[in-house]
Image: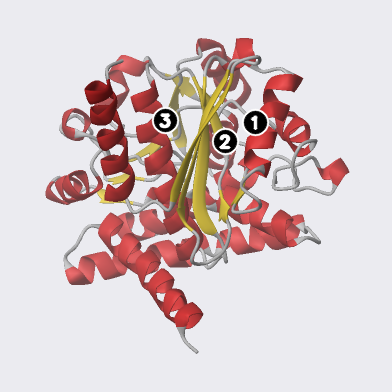
């Protein structure tokens, strides 16, 4: 690559990093194991950045960078709005998790995490499991999401699902006048670990649940287990449903899908559900669809690993903290309605307010 071409790439990367206000972005490469990863630290005003590591077969490095920048910024807001003393960070590993993950691969990633000296703590995310955290922990102590046998909090997905369930019920109260989900037609898009737990909560409340996933086997298994209805992914947005629950990857709420959605509210576990948080937040308002801010209602997993980070982990206490998502969500929806702004904007304002106040405390003498 010529020097002028390299300069164009560098300028593009720096522009994207500074646009979202990141403190540090680390590009990790290890030739022997084939590891390619990016660690993004967005903000550490409230504490060290904590966020999971996602492994995905991205189309290219630009796509991976976009994902990690948006995810890490979301973690900043998620920690702040949940009242946690944590900053926002995230990591992505580029590649096929089914083929590339080995002990050496994961431990090499652990060394990169360790090199940041505690500015970033990792945890599990898409295609990363508790067992993977064990290997990473062999090279660094800056890791959460460890098995309960090692003093960790174990799988955080049940807590994430519970927080989403609480946020969904709060939003339902705002939209329908009551938080009982019995008889409500709910479409869950993505039935991985979090989505599957959410389906269980919804079925227990006698909701009418429709599911879809890129893995047909998951859909068939859950449909048989819970008696829910599997739907082809292409037609999912056209379903006649009361609640759309995106629980897979982000950006599913966009120009194309908003015009197709036939729901009254959106509440799901996916990160960065709005492709453009400003534009699509207000487009939902125009379509009279109430949106539960994703970084608020999917904060249960972060609450779980935060308690592990603090030490003396207690599962019951974690679920009690996740239950508070209900009140926070309802409060934000009320603020958004009163001020005639999108719920996403209302949530971001609340998160940024706490960060700004804590920044003043840190700098005051």
* Residue 310 in sight from this viewpoint: yes
Q: Is residue 333 left or right of residue 116?
A: left
| Residue at 45% in and 56% down | 76
Q: Is 179 situated above or below 55?
A: below
Residue furthest bottom in the image: 365
Task: Please state which of residues 252 and 107 is positioned toward the viewer in this rendering.
Answer: 107
Residue at horizontal 70%, vertical 48%?
142
Callouts 1 and 2 close, C-beta under 8 Å = yes
Task: Count residues near mark 3 (Cα–Cα under 10 Å), then give few for <14, some for 14-19, many for 20+.
Answer: some
The 10 Å Cα crowd at callout 2, few under 14, some 14 to 19, many 20 or more, is many
Element at label 3: loop
User: Which comes before the other along the chain, label 2 or label 3?
Assistant: 2
Image spot of residue 291 (x, y percent): 30, 50
Q: Which label number is shown at residue 249? A: 3
Q: CA distance from mark 3 to mark 1?
A: 23 Å
Q: Nearer the viewer, residue 2 or 101?
A: 2
**Secondary element at tag 2:** strand
Position of residue 281 measured from the top left corner of the image (x, y, whole percent): 22, 49
Q: Which residue is mark 1?
A: 109
């Amino acid at each position: 690559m010529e020097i002028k071409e390299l300069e164009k790439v560098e300028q593009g990367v720096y522009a994207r990093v500074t646009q979202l206000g990141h403190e540090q972005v680390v590009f990790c490469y290890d030739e022997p194991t084939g590891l390619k990863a990016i660690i993004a630290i967005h903000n550490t005003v409230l504490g060290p950045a904590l966020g999971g590591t996602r492994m995905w077969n991205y189309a290219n490095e630009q796509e991976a960078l976009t994902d990690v920048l948006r995810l890490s910024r979301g973690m900043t807001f998620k920690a702040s709005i949940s009242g946690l003393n944590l900053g926002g960070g995230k990591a992505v590993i580029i590649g096929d998790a089914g083929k590339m993950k080995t002990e050496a691969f994961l431990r090499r990633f652990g060394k990169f995490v360790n090199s940041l000296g505690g500015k970033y703590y990792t945890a599990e995310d898409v295609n990363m499991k508790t067992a993977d955290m064990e290997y990473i922990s062999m090279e660094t102590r800056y890791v959460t999401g460890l098995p309960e046998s090692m003093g960790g909090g174990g799988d955080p997905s049940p807590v994430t699902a519970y927080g989403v369930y609480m946020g969904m019920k709060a939003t339902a109260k705002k939209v329908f006048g009551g938080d009982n989900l019995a008889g409500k037609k709910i479409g869950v898009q993505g039935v991985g670990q979090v989505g599957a737990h959410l389906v269980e909560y919804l079925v227990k409340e006698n909701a009418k649940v429709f599911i879809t996933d890129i893995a047909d086997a998951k859909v068939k298994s859950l449909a048989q287990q819970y008696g829910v209805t599997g739907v082809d992914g292409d037609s999912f947005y056209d379903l006649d449903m009361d609640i759309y629950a995106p629980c897979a990857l982000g950006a599913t709420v966009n120009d194309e899908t908003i015009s197709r959605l036939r729901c009254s509210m959106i509440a799901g576990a996916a990160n960065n559900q709005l492709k453009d948080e400003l534009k699509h937040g207000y487009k939902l308002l125009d379509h009279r669809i109430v949106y539960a801010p994703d970084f608020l209602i999917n904060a249960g997993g972060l609450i779980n690993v935060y308690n592990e980070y603090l030490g003396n982990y207690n599962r019951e206490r974690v679920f009690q903290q996740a239950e508070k998502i209900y009140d926070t969500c309802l409060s934000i929806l009320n603020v958004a309605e009163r001020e005639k702004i999108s719920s996403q904007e209302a949530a971001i304002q609340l998160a940024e307010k706490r960060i700004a106040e804590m920044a003043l405390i840190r700098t005051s003498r």
